[in-house]
Amino acid sequence: MVGSNQQIKRFYRYEQKKRLLAILLLMTFSFVALICRLIYIEVITGNELSVKALDQWWRDVPITAKRGDIYDRNGVLLAGANTAYTLYIRPSEVKNKQTTAQVLSEVLDLTYASLIKKLESRQSEIKIKSGMDKDEMLKTLQSRAEGIYFSQTVKRVYPYADFMAQTLGFVNADVHGQTGLESKYDVYLSGVDGYILTETDLVGRRIENGITRYLDGTPGHNAHLTIDYNIQKSIEDAVKEAYITHSAKSVSCIMMDVETGEILGMAQAPSFDLNNVPRSDPIALLANSKCTWASDTFEPGSTFKILTAAIGLDSGAITTKSTVTCPGYHVVDGQKIKCWRTRGHGTQSFSEAVANSCNVMFMNIASKTGISTLYDYFDRLGLDEKTGIDIVGEASGILISKDSVKNVDLARIGFGQSIAITPIELLVASAIVVNGGTQVRPYILDYFADDSGKTVLKNYPITKTGIISSTTSKIMREVLENVVVNGGGKNAAVSGYRIGGKTGTAQKYENGAIARGKYISTFIGFAPADAPKYICLIVVDEPVGAYYGSIVAAPYVGKIFSEVLPHVGIASAFESSKTELIMPSVVGLGIEEVTYIFELLGIYIEVYGEGNTVTKQSPIAGTKISSNSLVAFELDL
Amino acid sequence: MIYSASSYVGSVKYGDSLFYVKKQGLALLLGLVCMYLASRMDITKIERFGLPIYIVGLVLLLIIFIPGVGSNAYGATRWIDLRVITFQPSEIAKFTLVVFLAKLFSKKHPTTIASMIIPILVVACMLVAVLLEPNMSCAICMAAISMIMFIVGGIRFRHAVAFASLGIGGGIALIFAEPYRIKRLMAYLDPWSSPRGEGYQLIQSYYALGSGGLFGVGLFASRQKYLYLPFSESDFIFSIIGEELGVIGCVVVLLIFSVYIASGIAIAIKSDERFKSLLALGIVSVVSVQTILNVAVVTGSIPPTGLPLPFISAGGSSLIVFLIATGVLISIDTEKIKQAKRNWVRMTS
């Protein structure tokens, strides 16, 4: 028994040793496995991990790059940038808090108490003052204050405040463009921010012996626009005047180079100060910061007749010899469509009909041209697509789909109703008509130059010739010049210059119905009329009182041209004799009598409504008018 | 190493970059004295007092629950605050369990169900106490150690399998009993899905290891210790070793542990007394299981759980206890010599 007991014991000892070795083996295996895992993490995925780790070890303070300036075509600064500095303090690095607080309170005009409170906080870094200029920054830097550092920000400055507000646009708190060109070309203007990189611990405290690196940024590029400051100034003044004089909802005006598509000026009222953007009412700001002349469509009304006439001539649907008899309306498919002069224009030649803006003539032209040809021309004139101007939020025209155009629609389209286009589309299409038939792409940015003056981006005119024939264009120039000389565009005439143009008065639609008393008055003018260089469109939205394009819109284009043309070196060719007259009160008089008197004096008159008695007159009695100006009357019926 | 890993935490939390080093240095000094004493100790005394030792361990675990004694941190009551030093009774309990199991198995091989009842109860009591803290990681550690002791103690294979499956099943049940454990499990499966939440620590550990590469960024040059990696001085000290000394440093550390473990097993094999052999095994198991689990956590090989790295992590009680255990191991190794000496003395007297 003893022997077997001994045997069992020996067996167990043997078994135990075996098991001990097995355990050792198991542990060894575990260790080997862990080492493999370590090699995998540290060596194989090491790079990838350490890159991610690097990212969290460095705290970066951005140094905002200097934003590029915006200049007009002659180097007038429209938007500049000032560098502002923000002072931060790292309380942990301030050894003598009293001294630092004392020094800073003297240099920065801050209270000692507030400073010492900040210095004693446990935050890793604390903002002391922002918006400091360079002098203040240098003074602080040279003081005995400890633990200070600066970050650099850029403040946008607009020397002319509300000048071109919608087009230039404004920037947000991070100095990135929010609207207009600032937004459109933000990538070029903003440059590349630099960074101050600091080695920190988890909560951003700088670690002892940590390294601070400065990564320089690249300043933004300077924008040079096609805008001419002087032209812009004239336009701004005219727009503001029109806005105030007619208590309009809004007024916008654009001038473009007819041959290249360069925008020389554009203004919009109401405007706002770009240096002090009214952000308290975001909805109003949003509405007010749009370039409505590119983003909003409208029924152009009579100014559209420029296009209808040109299409009619170019397609051969009519000739200059075509005549029309206007009884004050035209019947299409049993529907009576009125001419604006409900009393009728009588029998007129093509040229006269254009000068009088007779709707019946243009209904005829549209009908004769036919829907297919008309839409084909619309396409070529670019009415169904964006013009490609470098503005954020450009819209494209809205045309009734070709298949659903009824004859009445076609007639209306002829005089600029039942079609909605943007002012810039109207301007470009009109430019094609008068410039010899060349399509242009409007643009505002001429080029971007970098810090050293090297051009980095350049816009060139994009043109396409042969949209309409040069013969048609020539006829249209003559006809439109006649409008200013003898017709509804008289108020746009500039003494000594040849101006062509066309008025427009369109009724506004709201919720699909004509909105009573709401009009959009427009005028398109171009100069010189024989060899156009400049084309200008003004849109007066909802003028109060007089609303005829001839009274509300045309004079401002005339005024702009009278200032711009001498400025650009186009000499006055002739001096016309002008007699100054005082506008009498004719309200209550018979229209026959009034017409007789005014025509004798050579003053062009426009008559709205029916009846025999004048109920309203424009301009009001007592206004100075010249012998070659235009007046308008409203009748009792 | 502790100095490097803890200096920043120490200076930020206590305004003293040497805070942890001082504490650890004190513990090391105390531990070395204890180790020397333990190495001179007569192992048979330990065997004789097996049961009281076990009971002391269990009582220490339980007094934590007496209000005012236990110190609560991170949602668990694991520490006893003695002002100067806080210590985790579970660190001691592990070893007392090992002592008692060694005693039980040396008397009776756990080959039958009947012979296993007492040892199982002994283990179960400890596990329950530890789980109540709650301290899942320590429980896992204890379970693994017990398992090793049962195996070497002579448990039958089929019983071992049954136990293992029971243990794993219980473990899974416990994981699902606590929402934070499930979160941790998810964090383990995909730490990048919650880089700021549950996955944060593991990701930071990866960053540390990944930055270390093959040779490390150099001693004291760790960046992750700047509060990025939580517990960089204790449970995650191995990540900082990996960052500062690279794979090479990690492998060297693991090799040192291997030597320790291999020597321990050798002592267990050489020892002619069953109790001593099992005790040596138990001590080695504690060290190896804890090392393996710690490194596995740090490398994201198993779900994260808080276990210090023996001898290296900051933590006074842990260091002292491990040093005492090492002293016992030395004592077992030198037992024969001591016995010979004693015999010699007897013979000569």
Image: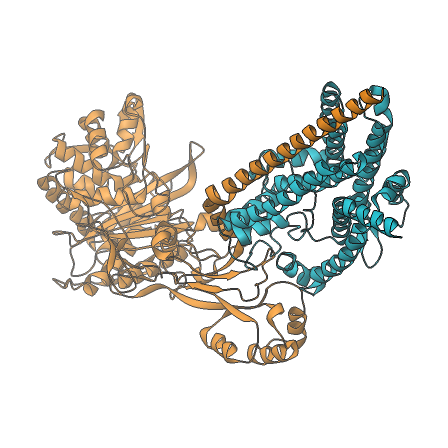
Left or right relative to A469: residue B10: right
Q: Which of B216 and A133 lies nearest the eye of the viewer?
A: B216
What residue sits 39% from the left and 61% below the top? A217
Q: Which of A184 and B97 lies nearest the eye of the viewer?
A: B97
Tell me where residue B333 appears, x and y as whole percent: 74, 45
Q: Which of A367 and A578 lies nearest the eye of the viewer?
A: A367
Q: Give the total of numbered labels.
A: 0
Tell me where residue A596 appears, x and y as whole percent: 23, 49
Q: Can residue B170 be seen in this view?
A: no
What residue sits 42% from the left and 31% below the top? A512
Q: In which quarter of the image is the N terminus of chain A?
A: top right
Q: Which of A304 and B94 lies nearest the eye of the viewer?
A: B94
Left or right relative to A189: residue A449: left
Tell me where residue A322 appears, x and y as whole percent: 12, 33
Question: Could you say which quadrant of the image residue A572 lies in?
Answer: bottom left
Q: Which colour scheme is used?
A: by chain
Left or right relative to B147: residue A357: left
The chain coloured cyan carries which letter? B
Tell me where residue A342 appears, x and y as whole percent: 30, 36
Q: Chain A is drawn in which colour?
A: orange
Left or right relative to A610: residue A362: left
Q: Is residue B141 visible?
A: yes
Question: Could you say which quadrant of the image residue A98 lies in?
Answer: bottom right
What residue sits 64% from the left and 76% below the top? A97
Image: A201 above or below B283: below
Q: Quadrant of the C terminus of chain A?
A: top left
